[in-house]
Image: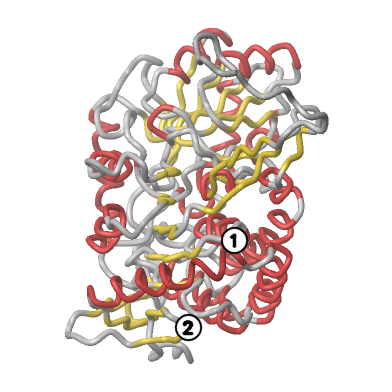
Amino acid sequence: MPHEFLDRPGDYYDGAFRRAAGDDALHIVSPADTSDVTAIHPYANSALHGALAAARAAFPLWRKTPIDQRAAALRRYQASLRAHGAELTDIIAREVGKPSWEAKTEVDAMIGKVDVMLAEGRAVTDDRVIADLPGEVRRRPLGVVAVIGPFNFPGHLPNGHIVPALLLGNCVVHKPSERTPSVATWMARCMHEAGLPPGVFNVVQGPGEFGAELATHPEVDGLMFTGSAAVGRRIVASQGAHFERLIALELGGKNASLVLDDCDLERTARALVFSAYVSAGQRCTATSRLIVTRGIAPRLIARLAEITRGLVVGHPLEGAVFMGPLISDQARERLLIAQGVAIDHGFRAVVAGGPYAVDKHQGYYVRPALHVAPAPDVIAPGYSDQELFGPDLAVYVVKDLDHALALANDTWSGLTAAVFTASRAAFEQAAEELRVGVLQWNRASAGASARLPFGGIRASGNHWPAGLLAGAACSYPLSVQFPSVEPEPLPSWPGAGLP
């Protein structure tokens, strides 16, 4: 499957696409079909330094550009995204392995992010007058912001940091995942078509080591990272003396959905299947733990198994496919090993996982799996206590809501949770006690609104949420106080000896 953008340079900095000089290159094949080479991106460390230098040089003029002009440039970027929507959908589907319908929703989210950030999102960081001081709060850009993106949403998640960063006057160096690099190249093309000044937006391709260097580079004033909790910890530990650098982390979660006896069975089952298996389970908001009360558990498990067995797994560009492959053979192997651990610890495979063969395509496919724990307190190390990032749902049957809440909170993470109940009082109790940053009531956990904050607590983040509040992580407040309208007496102090 040829791609017209395949042979173009993957790096973009100082207003131009550039081919890195050297023998190192990212050779990207589709996880859906390893015969499909989606991109070859040469990379070199010199490009990283070139991008940072270009961003630093562009910052003084860009920060002085009136915000309405910056907003207009982002509107042109949005128009370019819309014009290239089909190409973006295609490359997301092929490089990530998402079905086309899902890849298109990601592109739509990228387009919609501009609307949100130029309206409600901008209002969050608009200058604010405090008339009775008199004084003002003015937002100021950090400077050069590095955005390190994930493979599972290579467009939507970095875009959610890039758009507010540019709106507020920062210059950006974006380092995409080495597994899904080509969406960033398309984003650069859209920024270029939007006429952004050279150096304002830059893309650098390369391995994970480039991200580590960005995280500690002295030219970086702020860092926005989306990825695993383990890498987030390494980033924080690497800062050393750079305590002044603002770091915003969007990390993973071992997310729970809590289901009570009074739930709507069919709606709940459908939401749970979506949450557990969409994107092949490769979402930070995926439900991996289902905690259900005893009365509804047998019927719910039976319905979940029925729906799960009917899910269509296949090539993302072919037919009515719900779920594509995992991102890599290593990811598949990790999942299969973890599922083996679950069986060894007494988990019952109601719907067995395992490798899955797709006709005419050699990829990293697996079947969605549903396991039931032998008891609520059983821990299978490497399975029940870690984010699997694959299509697997573990079910724990508990006696009541209090038991469910205690089990849900007994984890290292705090990203998202869902509660399924007809009782507002039960939901409010859960909202009060659950330690998460995003909570859904009778809705799938695997989703979020761009018009709300998005981020987790504990090891799922560091209290700089994205979504509507993303602009706060790439700017700082300047407090300004003016003289009073009425003249004040000259200041004097005891013991000053003033005449």
Residue 92 left/right relative to 381: right
Report the number of discs. Answer: 2
Which color scheme does this rendered protein use? secondary structure
- Of residues 222 and 439, the one nearer the viewer is 222
Quadrant of res 40 = bottom left
Task: Identify the secondary structure beneath mark 2.
Answer: loop
Compared to 127, does 70 lie above or below? below
Residue 246 left/right relative to 34: right
Residue 84 left/right relative to 200: right
Q: Quadrant of the C terminus?
A: top right
- Of residues 316 and 456, the one nearer the viewer is 456
Disc 1 and disc 2: Cα gap in Å?
17 Å
Compared to 413, does 9 lie above or below? below
- Of residues 362 and 387, the one nearer the viewer is 387
Circle 2 residue: 15
In the rendered structure, which disc, 1 or 2, sits on the residue that comes first in sequence?
2
Q: Quadrant of the N terminus?
A: bottom left
Circle 1 residue: 163
Q: Could you classify mark 1 by the number of other residues whose Cα lies within 10 Å: few (under 14), some (14-19), or many (20 or more)?
A: many
Provide residue 14's location: percent of width, then percent of height: 43, 80
